[in-house]
Image (cartoon, helix red, strand yellow):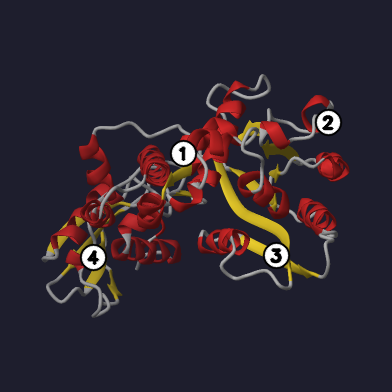
Amino acid sequence: MPSYKTMIHSILLWIWHYNAEALLQSQCNLDVFPCVYPCVRSGKSARTVCRSSNNEDDEDLDEDFEIDVDQESCGKAIFEDDSEVLLSPLPQYLSESDIPFQPTSPLSQADETQRRIDEQQKQIDMLLKAMNNGIPNVQQRATFAENPSQSLANSGEAPSSSVSVVPLRVMVFIDGTWLYYSIHERRANVCPIIAKYGRGWQQYYAFNWNELPRVICEVLQEQESKSGWLNSDGRPVEVSRVNVFTSVKKNTSKHSNRLKMFDEMKDANYDVYMMETVGQGEKCIDIQLAVEMLHYATVPNAYDVAILLSGDKDFMPALIRTRQKARKVGIVSMKTYCNRALYETHNIADYDIIWLEDYLDRLFLPKEVVRKESS
């Protein structure tokens, strides 16, 4: 009759027989598995002789015995003295053929971990490339969704290292009263519009209000690129809002050039704030504009640059306070009607003044062209 330790050892071997791969990964006694594991893999009747231990000091365990596995997955351990120990059958949900023969090692596990890390890094690179470069059309988006690795590999392009730049937000504040008089009510001998298009130009030409924000963006972009504090590319510029502040008399005709101009501004998506006045006074317009400019200067992310379209020096305190709120300031005006203090005083603006006279060809177009562009 085998000893108690021998029986325990045989039961342990049978447990190994059930899940030899897991024991291999756990670095169990590898001397036993070369002879036990083949019979587990075969799924057929097998009789294999095993040595329980190679430790010469362990006399109780240093003996030969056999594992006999039949077709029904029942087995027994047979020792040298022909004594037997019956072993329980394999569970029905686990057959011997279900146990794959994939012995692993710590080195192969490390390789597998590194392989997965590399795959994840590739996925991250592909996502970054898709975010930076975009997927141009619907067909390519569908291909990328089905197989991102293949679609990017076919492009033959390396992952992009470009960084997206947040556009410079610009908010325009227009002194509508000053602008109206500068365009429509100036003397012919000093008006650059009449000098270029002749008297009565309003019958044939119109101000292209959609072009004004584009001109501002282009000029600021150019000046930003030439600034000594920035790189040569500069930042993209976008106009987030155009605010117009003006007033009209109560008896002003709806067909007047004044109301027509502000209606055209509204059609161009300008925000027009119009006050109705009594008598000859047109006060409070400059105060309202200055308050709005300073208000948005304190609103986070409202704008980066405040553009004042006016020639009135009364706005200088508002410009100074706006710069003290860490916002940049620019001025758009007309040379003939701009107070000299706006362009001769230091620390009033961060950009050179944009003169409307320099862009008359873009701002004043035939009425038919303006109508087509607005429609």
Q: Which mark is residue 341?
A: 2
Residue 194, image quadrant: top right
Residue 131 at what x, y percent from top left? 42, 46
- Residue occupying image coordinates x 80% and y 57%: 295
Q: Earlier in the sequence, mark 4 or mark 3?
A: 4
Q: Name the residue under label 4.
A: 82
The crowding category of the residue bearing disc 4, from other C-alpha atoms within 10 Å (few below 14, some 14 to 19, many at least 20), is few
Q: Which of 270 and 298 is in front in this view?
A: 270
Residue 261 at what x, y percent from top left? 57, 58
Q: Which mark is residue 362?
A: 1
Q: Mark 3 points at which residue?
A: 273
Q: Left or right? Give the position of 177 relative to 100.
A: right
Residue 349 at what x, y percent from top left? 76, 33
The crowding category of the residue bearing disc 3, from other C-alpha atoms within 10 Å (few below 14, some 14 to 19, many at least 20), is some
Query: Label 3 vs label 1: CA separation?
Result: 26 Å
Q: Earlier in the sequence, mark 3 or mark 2?
A: 3
